[in-house]
Structures are given as C-alpha cells and as structure tokens.
Amino acid sequence: MTMQISCDAIIHHPRKLVYETYRDKLPELLPYLPNIRGIEIKKREQEGDVVKFVNVWRGGGDIPTVARAFLSESMLAWTDYATWRQDAFECDWRTETHAFTEAVTSQGMNRYFEVDGGTRLEIRGDLTIDAAKIKGVPRLLAGKVGRAVEEFLVKTISKNLLDVSKGLERYLNEKAKG
C-alpha cells in the first residue's frame, strides 16, 4: 500500500530567497528544527541551474531519552537524494532509510510558488512500506502492520516537513533583522 504525503506551507519571504535558502543553507536551519539532530551534506553537484544533493539526516530530537536506549542510530537516520531545478523552482527527492531499507520507499517533489505575501511550498510524495520485508513481522500481520507504520510515518514526515518550513521562515526573519 502506498500513502500520499501532501503538505503546503506559506513562507512570508520571496520565492527565490526561500528556494535558495532551503537548497543551500539547510545545515544552518538545524537550530530551528526540533526533531532533527543533524544534517550532513555528503555530495553537491551543479550543472547550470540544476543542483544535485546527497544529504544524511539524523532525527530523534523529540524522542524521549528512555526510548533512545531501544532505538539504534540507524533507525533515526535517512539519506535524501534531491535534484533542484532553479528554472522551475522545484525539487525532486527520494529518501532511503538507514533501517529497513528494503521495506521502505519514499519519493516526491517540492514546488515553490509566488503568492501574495511570500511563497507557497507544496510538498507531494509517496511513502510505501512492505512490512513483509521487516524481520520479525509475521506474514499474516504484515499488511496491517505496514498500514499502521505508513500512517504513523506520513503524519510524522508531514509534521517534520512543515517544521522545516517554519524553521526556514524563522531563520529568514532573523537574518532580515540583521
């Protein structure tokens, strides 16, 4: 089963600034992202108006200390492959989780639109979890477990994507104040 990721955010700054900040200053946004502990740029390639990134994200900022004892670092990390096209103000992305890589697929597109008062960021994507490929999940329960995990992750991912947008706006507001 595939679940849709769909979030929109209004960021009260010009589209070009929002787009370029999201693309080029992501690690600087870390202090504004409560559920992200790290963002590491592994690779950046540019050809004209197209920029390709490979970034490693480390989540877990909101996970209680007690729970962290039971979660490995790999369960809270993912690699993001993103292609940014300046001429279209859009970004295609694909993520690979560091845990359950064979069971989880996620991909989509972010688009940036000029609107009154700033920029509308549209985030659209798909998340699929094949629980039958996760060790320890009985085949009879795989569909039910997969759907439950997908629903949880879509809610979590959507919240995190909106948090990045809010963090980006706070970052730009502080930069504008000087």
Image (spheres, rainbow, N blue to C red):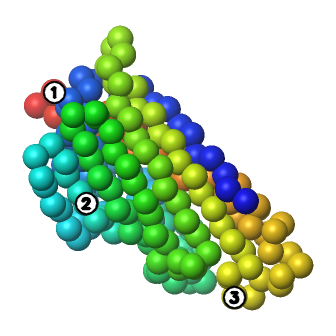
Instruction: Check disc 1 and report the residue beneath it.
Output: 177
**How far is mark 2 from mark 1, CA to CA?**
30 Å
In front here: 126 or 175? 126
Instruction: Check disc 3 and report the residue beneath it.
Output: 135
The mark closer to the camera, 3 or 1, is 3
**How far is mark 3 from mark 1, CA to CA?**
51 Å
Quadrant of the rendering where the N terminus is positioned? bottom right
In front here: 177 or 165? 165
Percent across and percent down for residue 54 are 28, 65
Q: Is residue 82 left or right of residue 175?
A: right
Residue type at mark 2 is Phe
- Circles 3 and 1 in contact, beta carbons < 8 Å: no
Name the residue: 48% across, 66% down.
60
- Secondary structure under tag 1 reads helix
Quadrant of the rendering where the C terminus is positioned? top left
Name the residue: 35% across, 62% down.
81
- Secondary structure under tag 2 reads strand
The quarter holding residue 116 reads top left
Q: Residues within 10 Å of mark 2 (few under 14, many from 20)?
A: some
- Secondary structure under tag 3 reads loop
Q: Which mark is residue 53?
A: 2
Asked if residue 163 shows in the view, the reply is no
Name the residue: 63% across, 62% down.
128
Pick whichever of labels 3 and 2 is earlier in the sequence: 2
The mark closer to the camera, 2 or 1, is 2
Q: Is residue 102 left or right of residue 172?
A: right
Above-or-below relation of 77 to 20: below
- Circles 3 and 2 in contact, beta carbons < 8 Å: no
